[in-house]
Amino acid sequence: MSIKFSSLTFGFIFGLSSLIVAKSSQAALINFSSWNLAGDVEITSLGEVDLSTNALQNDDSPSPDSNFNFSNLPAIDTATLESNLGLPSQSLEPDHNNFVFAFEGSGLENQYTFTEETTLSFNWTFLTNDETRNLSGFDFDDYAFIALNDQIQTLAITNSSISTLIPSSTNFSRQVSGSYTQTFSPGTYSIAWGVVDVGSFDQTSALTVNNAQLFPFNQPIPEPNSLFSLLVPLGFFAVSFLHRR
């Protein structure tokens, strides 16, 4: 009888822990391996990806491209990037009518169908070797963006009036970081990230995304430490109970 009861105890504890894990698993880090990648894009882990404007053409001479290119693949021209990300032609040009062009860049895109309200959240860092400069009307403000169903939202730009960049401890000169949250109604959506070189081909800029995840709206995300703190006492209870039996 004691063995049978102990088995039930273990079953109860295992079932409870499984429920906790199942509940937390509703918040999932994004697996970028199934996404459409274009240009210099490197998937570093679940929920993490790095991309740059480096085209492996001595973009930051005399510094080697390897200091700024993540995947050893070159950035691509903007027209090709727009096509790969499913964006309208010239949509990445800051001001096409006034000859302010985005020359090259990298990005990634995927489509999701949500059956319930779903939240996307992530942290990002924009890195650049470019300076805020304007020569005879030419704009050189590289920028990073997220595009949701063709609607482009700028995350950061080298123009300090939009985002204040600080000296970077990486190979890049300057950086700025932030976080982003967007909730989607049920439906099908295209989600894309990208970074582009504006006004020239030289001086690399980059975007790093981390902790990118999708989860049901208003669904709290258990912290790993909190989950561990719940399971450990249950484990001690089981061991203590069996020892007494």
Image: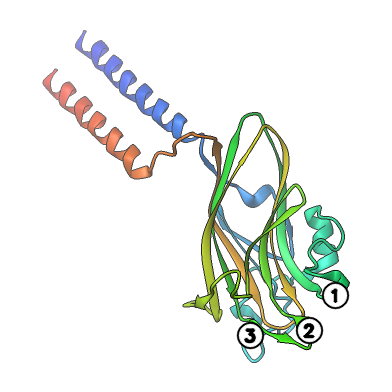
Does residue 102 appear left or right of residue 229 in this picture? right
Does residue 36 appear left or right of residue 175 in this picture? right
Most foreground residue, 191 or 9: 191
* Tags 1 and 2 touching, CB below 8 Å: yes
- Looking at marks 1 and 2 on the same chain, the residue that comes earlier in the sequence is marked by 1
Amino acid at circle 3:
Pro
- Looking at marks 2 and 3 on the same chain, the residue that comes earlier in the sequence is marked by 3
Amino acid at circle 2:
Gly
The secondary element bearing badge 1 is classed as helix
Tell me the distance, in whole angstroms, between the alpha carbons under discs 1 and 3: 33 Å
Amino acid at circle 1:
Asn
Q: Residue at x 33, y 19 (%)?
A: 11
For label 1, the crowd category at 10 Å Cα-Cα, with few meaning under 14, some 14 to 19 and many 20 or more, is few
* Tags 1 and 3 touching, CB below 8 Å: no
Mark 1 lies on residue: 98
Q: Would residue 8 be visible to someone looking at this image?
A: yes
Query: Which quadrant of the rendered structure holds the N terminus?
Result: top left
For label 3, the crowd category at 10 Å Cα-Cα, with few meaning under 14, some 14 to 19 and many 20 or more, is few
Q: Residue at x 22, y 25 (%)?
A: 238
The secondary element bearing badge 2 is classed as loop
Q: Would residue 46 be visible to someone looking at this image?
A: no
Does residue 81 appear left or right of residue 126 in this picture? right
Mark 3 lies on residue: 64
Mark 2 lies on residue: 137
- Looking at marks 1 and 3 on the same chain, the residue that comes earlier in the sequence is marked by 3
